Amino acid sequence: MAKVVLGVAVGVAVAACAVAALVVGRRVRTRRKWKRVVGVLKELEESCETTVGRLRQVVDAMAVEMHAGLASEGGSKLKMLLTFVDNLPSGFPILGQYSMIVGVPPVCYFGMVFEFLSCCNLAALSVSCSCILPWSEKGTFYGLDLGGTNFRVLRVELGGQRSSFDRDVAQQAIPPRLMTGRSEDLFDFIASSLQHLVEKGNDSEQSPIIKELGFTFSFPVKQTSVSSGILIKWTKGFAITDMVGKEVAGVLQQTLARKGLNMQVAVLVNNTVGTLALGHYHDADTVAAVIIGTGTNACYWERTDAIIKCQGLLTTSGGMVVNMEWGNFWSSHMPRTSYDIELDAESPNPNDQGFEKMISGMYLGDIVRRVILRMSQESDVFGPVFSSLSVPFALGTPLMAAMHEDDSPELTKVARILKDDLKIPDLPLKARKLVVKVCDVVARRAARLAAAGIVGILKKIGRDGSGCIRVGRTRSDTKMRRTVVAIEGSLYTQYTMFREYLHEALHEILGEDIAQHVILKVTEDGSGTGAALLAASHSSKSVDNVQLL
Ligand code: BGC
């Protein structure tokens, strides 16, 4: 009996030991796997490092590439495209006319202009707003803005006896099938939206007076005049092959004619150029414009004598806006990871738009997805690897931003997004924290690189403080000129952490003394409204209510 009892006891003890060993073994394995997951994050952090020293190298490379792109055609990855916009609308000279309206101080009108801008809720499908401007001439101008996930049409009423400035905006998402189909379908869709706005505004299509249109087409275009240009290539997931090499405004013009719309494309501009136009209209110190949205790009005001590749280029103003197409910028100083390399190789445009792929809204979410996928391959804490984590672009940048900015103690938003959008349920808190950290590393690198790009432009035009401009005669009068950069795009306007990192880097690179003179000004819907303003200032009807530089 005693033997039996002893045997059972030994058996139980052995079993207990085996279970304990199993548990311990599993724990050790789990811990090891978790260590590997943390290792993925560590490696990411190291390879995304953007020290100020490194950023300054990117600044220098940007300035050097700008010079090279201006020196010769194909001299750099930066195309530095001519825009033929050699005058920018400016609100200032109109000041003189303000006093004509009795009893209301000029400053009130400025207030109204800004109120006008802030009252527009662009998230809504259709918006109307108006304010008073003391202009004596009248003109209705249309803007058509194509370039990202959304497409906008707008009508801007400038001036008139009743001194009004009215605007109507309609926004629509571009159906994905139109981004990769035939050009005819895309342009039909655009023209129909425009037709709808014209009808809504009771602007008779049959009117003998031709309506003028500013067409914002935000892809690399080789301009042949301010109102015409040839598409060089598509970006941001658009791939309509029959359109490459075609004259963009001409295709739109033909479609408008086919639809019976009596409209003339007065200007064809990039969205950065529209943004610069509106930015300059409100603040004459605006010298450059940057977009950080689905894609990214910048343009700036350049002296014509610096555009060496175009010898003999003469403009009355002595300058011209240059569309940099900085999305294609590349420098070996940029911190590149294996995730960037994979993303690029799997994209429809490998070896292209390198800067854009590290910075813009189209790609940031997907970089984060790739890192989480790698983590999930190291540990089963994320669930099976074949989850929707393997689906390209399953995590959009707006979701990434929402996870990054989740400040709840339990990271409930992160949990919900992972569960609903990536089908990863019940991820433990420590793993959710890791996901937030991944978002942080990717967004921070992007924002800091964008800041370096902006300083690169400032360096090229001598506004980075390295050769301070004198405003007076004595040395003590040596001072930085106020420099405004108009900025637009959802990443900057809607992603607070991104914006804060960008500002922080700008200050780090420039130093406080210089940075205080550099102002980034959000120019809401500059790409569309700015194009309409440019259409007015280039109007064949000679609208002199929009003053030029
Ligand atoms: C395009 C630019 C555009 C930018 C921002 C880039 O992909 O090449 O022309 O300005 O996106 O929309």
Image (tube, helix red, strand yellow):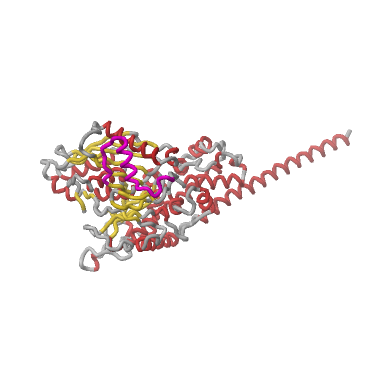
**Is the residue 39 above or below the residue 195 in the image?**
below
Residue 541: quarter of image: top left
Q: Does residue 134 appear to the left or right of 500 in the view shown?
A: left
Q: Is residue 243 magenta?
A: yes
Residue nearest the observer in this picture, 531 or 84: 84
Residue at image coords 22%, 39%: 210
Residue nearest the observer in this picture, 61 or 319: 319
Residue 476 image offset from top left, x and y in percent: 24, 66
Residue at image coords 35%, 48%: 247
Residue 226 image offset from top left, x and y in percent: 28, 50
| Count of marks, rendered view | 0
- From this viewpoint, is residue 238 visible? no
Residue 496: quarter of image: top left
Q: Quadrant of the C terminus?
A: bottom left
Q: Quadrant of the N terminus?
A: top right
Residue 253 image offset from top left, x and y in percent: 31, 42
Q: Does residue 499 appear to the left or right of 204 in the view shown?
A: right
The stretch in magenta equals 241-266
Q: Does residue 147 appear to the left or right of 104 in the view shown?
A: right
- From this viewpoint, is residue 122 visible? yes
Residue 503 image offset from top left, x and y in percent: 37, 52
Q: Is residue 57 magenta?
A: no
